């Protein structure tokens, strides 16, 4: 069984606080030995392998990889980008952080700003938040009704299927953090002036809707999980375990692509460098 199999969202998926502490078994850590140093070393090794595989992806210049990171505030989206994808050559990787839509973006359909940011051939693109905000915060605050939400699920499924059918590998990660751990991380940001830049008072407002968000995530993940665009629920109370799980799944997927450099050009053997 692969790491991806262990954390793939199933038909009976539920969002529970206990799941946010689940440990990766059979890798660098067990229930009795969740050593952060070992986790970091294992993740670093995987990050280097991911970087090497991305070089092959870029050289092959055929397929693309889209990584989607979703999660509650403080779940570690920024930390994942740094810890898992920080070794990749910047020429072949890109991170897009989606904020509240601008006035121009609101004048278009909700997928307009998303589609233009998807990866090109040979590229890895990481979405820090994504089109899923349009079936999460919009649903929690009743900006759209249930009927519109279901329509958007269908549109998202079609959108991701189109991406997959045109050569994009889609990997979606739900960074699952418990309410208690979020409280700790928010308090740490408030207590340390050097972390105030990370703090947004709106996070406290959204925290009041915790239960509604958990339900919205459950519905969205179950409605849009597919073999061509799978969801993985990653326990994120432990930052090092979170990164280790995601790095393991990304590495597994890239290896499964059997990437290789394109054939050499026989004409080059005739050239001489004077």
Image (cartoon, grey):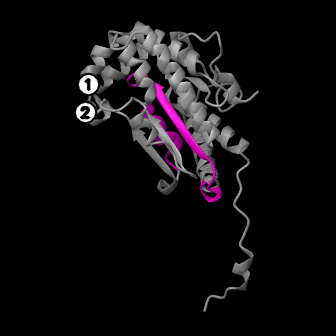
The quadrant of the rendering that contains the N terminus is top right
| Residue nearer the viewer, 272 or 198 | 272
Residue 32 belongs to the span the image colors magenta: no
| Residue nearer the viewer, 206 or 244 | 206
**Magenta-tinted stretch:** 58-87
In the rendered view, does 108 fall on the left or right side of 226? left
Q: Is mark 2 on a helix, strand or loop?
A: helix
The quadrant of the rendering that contains the C terminus is bottom right
Residue 205 figure quarter:
top left
Residue 69 belongs to the span the image colors magenta: yes
Name, please, the residue furthest toward the bottom.
Answer: 274
Q: Residue 88 carries which label?
A: none
Q: Which of marks 1 and 2 is nearer the N terminus?
A: 2
Marks 1/2: CA distance? Answer: 35 Å
Few, some or many residues within 10 Å of mark 2 (<14, 14–19, 20+): few
**Residue labelled with disc 2:** 103
Residue 4 figure quarter:
top right
What percent of the width, then of the height, locates residue 158? 56, 28
Residue 249 visible here = yes
What percent of the width, then of the height, locates residue 234? 56, 24
Q: Which mark is residue 191?
A: 1
Few, some or many residues within 10 Å of mark 1 (<14, 14–19, 20+): few
What percent of the width, then of the height, locates residue 231? 59, 25
91 up-or-down from 104: above or below: below
Tag count? 2
What percent of the width, then of the height, locates residue 72? 41, 21
């Amino acid at each position: 069984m692969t790491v991806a199999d262990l954390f793939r969202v199933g038909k009976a998926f539920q969002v529970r606080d206990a799941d946010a502490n689940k440990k990766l078994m059979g890798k660098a850590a067990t229930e009795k030995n969740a050593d952060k140093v070992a986790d970091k070393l294992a993740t670093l090794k995987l990050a280097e392998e991911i970087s090497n595989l991305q070089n092959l992806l870029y050289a092959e210049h055929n397929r693309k990889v889209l990584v989607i990171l979703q999660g509650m505030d403080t779940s570690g989206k920024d930390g994942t980008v740094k810890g898992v994808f920080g070794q990749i050559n910047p020429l072949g990787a890109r991170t897009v952080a989606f904020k509240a839509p601008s006035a121009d973006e609101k004048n278009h359909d909700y997928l307009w700003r998303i589609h233009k940011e998807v990866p090109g051939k040979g590229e890895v693109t990481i979405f820090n938040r994504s089109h899923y905000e349009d079936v999460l915060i919009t649903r929690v605050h009743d900006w759209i009704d249930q009927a519109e939400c279901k329509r958007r699920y269908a549109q998202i499924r079609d959108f991701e299927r189109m991406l997959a059918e045109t050569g994009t590998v889609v990997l979606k990660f739900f960074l699952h953090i418990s309410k208690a751990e979020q409280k700790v991380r928010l308090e740490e940001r408030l207590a340390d002036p050097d972390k105030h830049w990370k703090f947004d008072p709106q996070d406290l407002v959204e925290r009041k809707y915790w239960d509604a968000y958990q339900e919205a995530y459950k519905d969205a993940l179950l409605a849009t999980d597919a073999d061509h665009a799978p969801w993985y629920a990653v326990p994120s109370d432990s930052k090092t375990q979170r990164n280790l799980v995601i790095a393991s799944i990304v590495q597994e997927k890239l290896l499964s692509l059997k990437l290789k450099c394109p054939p050499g050009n026989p004409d080059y053997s005739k050239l001489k460098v004077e």
